[in-house]
Amino acid sequence: MQNITVIGSGTMGNGIAHTFAQFGYKVSLIDINDAALQKAITTITKNLDRQVQKGSIDENTKQQTLKNISTFTDLSKAVSNADLVIEAASENVEIKLKIFKQLDEICKPATILASNTSSISITQIASVTKRADKVIGMHFMNPVPVMKLVEVIRGYSTSDETCNLIMETSKQLNKVPVEVNDYPGFVANKILMPMINEAVITLYEGVAGVSEIDTVMKLGMAHPMGPLQLADFIGLDVCLNILRVLQEGFGNPKYAPCPLLVNMVTAGHLGVKSGRGFYDYSAGSKELILADRFKKTAQLV
């Protein structure tokens, strides 16, 4: 496989495009408008500059990486020559099903269709296509150029040939692919999201404040980032959506999202992307915004 199309130029999409392009693949990056694509190219350029400064790549590699990326707003043109399409759109099942149904109609019969979904069923996604054997999950971790893991998710009908090819392709990107089966949340988020939710519940119940919770998990459990700060970086809306997928998929109340998390998302406090979550990022520094409030109201919970 040499020609890769990435659908969606947001944080995950531009990271996936960056990574494939850096390793010599020809990448077609598509989004709904040129402004989104230009923002993505700017982000990729900045990230490449950071790699050059650190000495992990040279200037020639940076320039070749950028040359390997073409941008599109027309889906048909973007996938016309694709060997592999990776969807990195919003974590919304209706959006993904619509995209994959369309991809199945316009892509070459041999094209493999992959989703970067972090929780949605690959089997369900494959069900709207006529090539279920060629539909698979490639769940990259953020930031994609840095993180080694790729969860490779087999749908019910994903063929051995497709799975083996995606495993080998992931290794070509200097990643470590791990094959998992298609159940809600897969492995990473089936374990991670209940932990994040429990941290939010701990705050909600007034057991401790934001910094205290994160400090305990960093210093006591050797986590590089506390769960509340991590939730801010993932996006609180994304965390909420994944918890709802887990709750619906397993029918278990232990996955029910904390009311505090629901309220924060409803209020538009989504973490880093909105400038405010459990921490305040608006001034470029990390300021606690919830610890004192919930310590004071703990007796009412």
Image: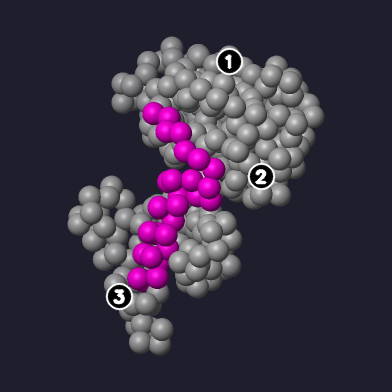
Q: Quadrant of residue 159?
A: top right
Residue 282, horizontal then vertical, whole percent: 45, 57
At numbered mark 3, what does the secondary structure look like: helix, strand or loop?
loop
Whichever of labels 3 and 2 marks the residue nearer the N terminus, that label is: 2
Magenta-colored stretch includes residue 288: no
* Region of the chain picked out in magenta, as a range: 176-203
Image vertical order of residue 168 relative to residue 185, above or below: above
Three-letter amino acid code of the residue under disc 3: Val
Whichever of labels 1 and 2 marks the residue nearer the N terminus, that label is: 1
The numbered dot on residue 267 is: none
Magenta-colored stretch includes residue 199: yes
Residue that carries the numbered disc 1 in the rendered image = 1
Residue 262, horizontal then vertical, whole percent: 53, 68
The residue at the far right in this view is: 105
Colour theme = one colour
Q: Is residue 193 visible?
A: yes
Residue that carries the numbered disc 2 in the rendered image = 124
Whichever of labels 3 and 1 marks the residue nearer the N terminus, that label is: 1
Side of 127 where 251 appears, left or right:
left
Q: Residue at x 74, y 35 (%)?
A: 129
Three-letter amino acid code of the residue under disc 1: Met
> Distance from label 3 to label 1 (Cα)?
52 Å
Q: Residue at x 40, y 87 (%)?
A: 300
The residue at the far left in this view is: 220
Three-letter amino acid code of the residue under disc 2: Gln
- Name the quarter where the C terminus is drawn: bottom left
Image vertical order of residue 262 relative to residue 71, above or below: below
Check disc 3: other Cα within 10 Å, few if <14, some if 14-19, many if 20+: some
> Distance from label 1 to label 2 (Cα)?
25 Å
Residue 9, horizontal then vertical, whole percent: 60, 36
Residue 88, horizontal then vertical, whole percent: 59, 38
Residue that carries the numbered disc 3 in the rendered image = 207
